Amino acid sequence: MKILSLFDGISIAQQAFKELGFEVEYYASEIDKQAISITQKNHPNTEQLGDVKEIDTSNGYLHYGKGKLAETDIYFLIGGSPCQDLSIAKNKREGLNGKRSGLFWDYVRILKDLKPKYFVLENVASMPKEAKQTITETLWDIEPIMINASLVSAQNRKRLFWVGKLADKRHIGHWDSADYEKVNISQPHDEGILLKDILETEVDEKYFLNNDRIKYVLNRPKQYAVKINPEKTNTLRTNYGNASANETYVTQRVGQIGKGGQGDRIYSPEGKSVGLSALGGGRRAKMGLYAVGITKGGTFGNRKTIRSDKAYCLAANPSSDGLPMTEINNTIIRKLTPIECERLQSLPDNYTEGISNTQKYKTLGNGFNCAVIKHIIKSIL
């Protein structure tokens, strides 16, 4: 089977095909050198095509190789066009006219030129209504399905998927026009996976807030202190176990540092993680911090690694000004490790081995959830 993946990233789609047992010829368009290195490590036979803008699809064939002299047809097209200009996380969204999200039109160009049997387009669920409508109208009025990766992983990650099948009965390629019809995709089965289920047991201390940092946080003036809202913890997993397509899993946010920017929000491992972001590394991490209880007899300070159990231990006590304050009892706060983030994307451990942690967080944040893509592929083929 011949697959073309646009905006391929670290080739999570290829990993999905591989885990399902398909033998594929895989062509990838990607410009991030770090991401490409991970793809070639895991899938060395990948044919890298470079910039999507420079892909030659003349005469209904994909041209590749030295001088683009080789050519092939494509059976399955998949891609998640960049979302930076569509995401609600960006204040001034330029939409489909933006420099990055405007690459959607290159996806459309290639789709119409190659006319594969199937296509899958992915993007953020938080895009403006107008952008969603434009994409749908462009793709033969095929309505997307919203799938939250929380059904098949420990991560809240809502994404839209437009899935189409070639309606024309003639052989793929070699004609001027083609119509596509919607492929109906069901919601994945709820696997019941929580963050605590994917946490590593032995974690390097560099991922934790140290004791001095925790004491500093707790002793700061009230307006900057760690605050938690016990009412939010009481609503955790409200829909867990019987969520329908229209219901949302609750991320268990139990506290915050200072004003509570995304990187300073504290979550419980008893719920789901926030969605991974391409900006997930460093002090300005977008994936938040997590309260992880220490096992009986556990210590933190002089050891290189820390053994943590799967439960948190935070207690809320109201302060004199009425704001709920936190008391930390045998609890440590840390960010997620790269391996844990790989697990959030339903990938094998050490899939991104070979690049820096910062690049691991970035490339993982840009990728698909592998289990979601496997579900879609199984629904199509």
Image: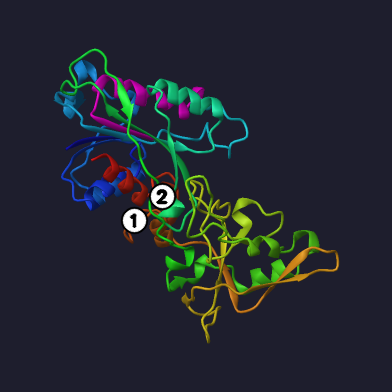
Judged left or right of residue 328, residue 277 is: left
Instruction: Please give the name of the residue rendered at 54% of the width and 68% of the height, measured from the top-left corner.
Output: 208
Instruction: Please give the name of the residue rendered at 51% of the width and 35% of the height, measured from the top-left corner.
Output: 84
Whether residue 58 is situated above or below residue 272 in the rendered picture: above
Foreground residue, 112 or 227?
112
Instruction: Give the structural element (helix, strand or loop) at label 2.
Output: helix
Residue 300, image quadrant: bottom right
Instruction: Please give the name of the residue rendered at 51% of the width and 81% of the height, measured from the top-left corner.
Output: 295
Q: Which residue is mark 1?
A: 347
Is residue 118 shown in magenta? yes
Give the residues drawn in magenta, as a range. 96-121
Q: Earlier in the sequence, mark 1 or mark 2?
A: 1
Outermost residue toward the right in this view = 320
**Percent x, y of residue 332:** 58, 72
Callout 1 amino acid: Leu
Dots 1 and 2: beta carbons under 8 Å? yes
Is residue 24 shown in magenta? no
Q: Which mark is residue 364?
A: 2
Instruction: Please give the name of the residue rendered at 52% of the width and 66% of the height, measured from the top-left corner.
Output: 269
